[in-house]
Image (spheres, grey):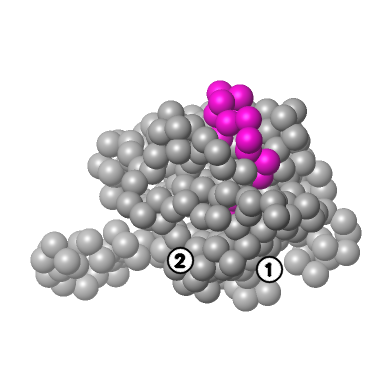
């Protein structure tokens, strides 16, 4: 009898997911709340056929070359900019991600962040908690309306469309978007969504939401020049990846009130957060939790586990990533 394939779960995960994997493969776990750096990951991966990762493990060309037994890299994240997919493909390693299962949960959170920035929710809460609330006044924490405003979406994939649905159908927003490719007319029509060039998006959006995947091409897609095009009353929300927005330029734009407010769930170099962002009041900051509900994180992890089981037993992956 062939030995069971061996899988390394590179980070702590729900016990039921470990149990599910154990029924099909031999499992080695990371039981500590630590992210293994690349070299430690290489050492621990020796002798393993598959690895369970999330958005943080660096699966680069060096790791791929150093782990000749590896056949499957399965991530519970939808974003896979931490994985060198070309290097994996060149060595015949299957890469999978976790699309769809987190779309609505992430869209809910993106919308919540946009509302919080526009209506100054965390900024006013900090004010209250610090004991500074003395009296009500007519312009006290006035923000910007979200209903009937123009929602601008950069990156109109599944999550972008789910945010557009919330805006158009729930908040009567006018939806404009910029994406490499236009949506089919039958997807645009129910949302009243209009494709515009990037400059028009930046100039016209009252609330800009960034949902574009990180790549070399999207690095600092929003920097000082782009922020300068936005309305001084506008908000910017990023639930995509750190690095799509130039965090230092954003902090400066917020400080100088070039835009009214921002909300970030993702950061360049996270979990470090640029000190200048921490110093501005008109920003909502959350620690990369847009997909964080128990139900959704469980589905994401289950999908990664099922991808590993399929690939290591010679079946087609459920959600492969193409190089
Ligand atoms: C994803 O799935 O890409 C989310 O950002 C969580 O890492």
Image x and y of residue 303, in percent: 64, 62
Where residue 62 sits: x, y (%)? 56, 23
Residue in the image at 19% along x and 67% along y: 128
Q: Nearer the viewer, residue 161 or 234?
A: 161
Residue 14 is tagged as: 2
| Whether residue 217 is situated above or below residue 17 in the rendered picture | above
Residue position marked by numbered label 1 in the rendering: 165
The residue segment tinted magenta is 59-78
Gap between marks 1 and 2, in whole Å? 31 Å
What is the tally of numbered marks visible in this picture?
A: 2
Residue 149 in which image quadrant: bottom right
In the shown orientation, is residue 121 left or right of residue 215?
left
Q: Position of residue 38 (x, y in %)?
A: 45, 31
Residue at image coords 51%, 68% = 19
Q: Is residue 79 visible?
A: no
Which circle's residue, 1 or 2, is located before the other in the chain?
2
In the picture, the quarter occupied by the N terminus is bottom right
């Amino acid at each position: 009898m062939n030995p069971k394939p061996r899988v390394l779960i590179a980070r702590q995960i729900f016990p039921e997911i470990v149990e599910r994997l154990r029924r099909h493969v031999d499992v080695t776990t990371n039981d500590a709340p630590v992210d293994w750096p690349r070299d430690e990951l290489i050492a621990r991966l020796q002798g393993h056929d598959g690895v369970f990762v999330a958005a943080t493990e660096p699966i680069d060309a060096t790791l791929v070359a150093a782990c000749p037994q590896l056949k499957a890299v399965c991530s519970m994240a939808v974003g896979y900019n931490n994985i060198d997919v070309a290097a994996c493909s060149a060595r015949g390693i299957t890469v999978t991600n976790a699309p769809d299962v987190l779309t609505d949960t992430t869209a809910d959170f993106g919308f919540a962040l946009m509302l919080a920035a526009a209506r100054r929710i965390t900024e006013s809460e900090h004010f209250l908690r610090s004991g500074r609330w003395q009296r009500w006044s007519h312009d006290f924490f006035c923000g910007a309306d979200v209903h009937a405003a123009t929602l601008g979406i950069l990156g109109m994939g599944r999550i972008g469309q789910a945010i557009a649905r919330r805006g158009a159908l729930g908040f009567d927003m006018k939806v404009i978007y910029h994406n490499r490719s236009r949506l089919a007319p039958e997807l645009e029509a129910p949302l009243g969504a209009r494709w515009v060039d990037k400059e028009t998006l930046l100039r016209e959006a009252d609330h800009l939401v960034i949902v574009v995947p990180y790549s070399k091409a999207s690095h600092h897609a929003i920097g000082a020049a782009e922020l300068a095009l936005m309305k001084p009353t506008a908000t910017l929300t990023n639930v995509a990846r750190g690095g799509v927005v130039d965090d230092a330029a954003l902090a400066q734009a917020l400080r100088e009130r070039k835009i009214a407010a921002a909300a970030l769930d993702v950061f360049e170099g996270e979990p470090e957060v640029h000190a200048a962002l921490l110093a501005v009041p008109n920003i909502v900051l959350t620690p990369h939790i847009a997909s964080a509900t128990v139900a959704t994180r469980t589905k994401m992890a289950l999908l990664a586990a099922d991808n590993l089981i399929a690939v290591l037993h010679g079946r087609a992956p459920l959600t492969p990533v193409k190089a």
